[in-house]
Image: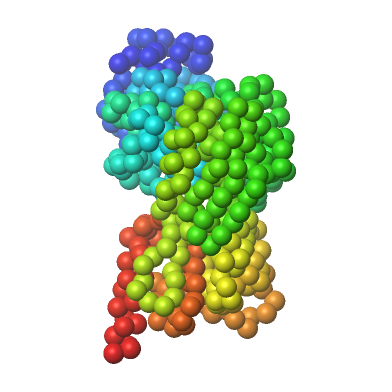
Amino acid sequence: MKLSELIYENEYVSGKNASDISVNDIASDTGEITEGCVFVCIAGMRHNTHSDISEVVSRGAAAVVCEKGQIYTHTDKIPVFEVENSRLALSKMWSRYYKNPHRQMKMIGVTGTNGKTSVCHYISSILTASGMSCAVIGTNGAFLDGREIVCDKSALTMTTPDPKSLYKTLARMRNMGARYTVMEVSSHSLALEKVAPIYFDIGVFTNLSPEHLDFHNSMEEYALAKSKLFSHSKCAVVNADDPYTDKILNGFSGSVIRCSTASGNAVATGIRLAADKTEYTYISRHLKFKLQTKIAGLFTVYNTLLACAAVTHLGISAVITREVMKYMKPPKGRMESVATGENFSVIIDYAHTERALASLLHTVKKFSDGRRIVTLFGCGGDRDKSKRAPMGKIACELSDSVIITSDNSRSEDKGGIISDILSGITSKENITVIEDRKTAIHHVIITAREGDIILLVGKGHEEYEIDENGVHPFSEREIVRSALKERRKKCE
């Protein structure tokens, strides 16, 4: 194809005409360069590929796109095109490469600190049950009408995939007949322009609490990144009870559906929380119906309320919405019970922020009936360090026993991360430190007492562990089963 099909004349400055250049691929990493590709230079957080121009030329690229203001070696061997924002250009180019697949579907984007995966799961389940072929892209992977779709492995560790994987996946969903796509939209993806070409029919905001502050530097910057979703959304469905909602909506001129437990466009009233279900009455301008789900917790009220507001705005009937929610199961790794065959419980949950951990523990504590709550968790390496001590404090205050361990340490020292967590804990009386997570899980299962509620927190859906040596297979479900066998052998 011609380069002019990927980058338009008003988007670059160059002495060359893009319509004169044929390209067969797009690359932004030197390891992906192929003969005849266009290479897009990116000023990354760890490496700036503007310094790789000589390699780009030697590897056979047909053209290169650079960002204005960046220092790079000029070359006469291949055409150079300067753009204002190379990340934005890259996203647009990949979108155009796959014929702008999002334009052939209704797009729903969900952003916020916690609850994105659950809200996407609820919306897609209701749409699918309504006969609307619906795709989901997010933390748990890519799905179409409930069936997992195999995508690029590089996308598996990202909430929102990089442009190359994202638009390829959207194109595949479109070609398979998807009418709707519901996707998790992370603050990173918004700040780095991954979803810039997409105009969303509905943007959903769940909540905001401290997270990724190593990247965003402040809560204000974090909120600003989230708000970018609504700069290209037609309708906003928001949690009106969150203190950051007005900041998120600042400047938004589209229609807004404010969801609340007090007053708003969509209200949950008469809330009843139990150990095995959540009930409330959903009230909007034109609808009123009883909603019941088997998923416990106050966070479930907000997540289901947002989902119901979104699907009813799309015209899905209250009858279908209510019936689907009645039998809904939580997504993988969210309050997920693991069968043990023993007299204690094991729950896997993805909570990896202060608010998510507190919400999980408050929910479990409310229905524990005096049973011992045992919390096993760690914090990720090369990520926001400011949440480590507060999470240690929360775990200690709301649990009867805490096991502190590793969780995707990446390039950081595991012991250093654990020390950061311990710095928030004043009393170490019920604290156990076991650095290796597999060993820690075996320990907590083998030493479990009758009635214990064991919470394996932080990894949720993940089937891998990331350390200084890379990504390794790591299934907490398999480890629990292995530990149960070891426990039974010891009891024989």
Is there any visible trace of residue 212 in the rendered image? no
Q: Nearer the viewer, residue 78 or 289?
A: 289
Q: Position of residue 193 (x, y in %)?
A: 52, 31
Q: Position of residue 21 (x, y in %)?
A: 34, 14
Q: Please tell me which residue is depicted at 29% across the width and 85% down the height of the picture.
A: 489
Tell me where residue 488 sits by quadrant.
bottom left
Q: Is residue 482 left or right of residue 106?
A: left
Q: Nearer the viewer, residue 243 or 293?
A: 293
Q: Nearer the viewer, residue 210 or 314?
A: 314
Position of the C terminus by quadrant: bottom left
Q: Please tell me which residue is depicted at 50% across the width and 42% down the height of the picture.
A: 119
What's the colour scheme?
A: rainbow
Is there any visible trace of residue 3 in the rendered image? yes
Q: Please tell me which residue is depicted at 35% across the width and 64% down the height of the picture.
A: 477
Q: Please tell me which residue is depicted at 33% across the width and 45% down the height of the picture.
A: 153
Q: Position of residue 225 (x, y in %)?
A: 62, 36
Position of the N terminus by quadrant: top left
Q: Nearer the viewer, residue 246 or 424?
A: 246
Q: Position of residue 297 (x, y in %)?
A: 57, 56
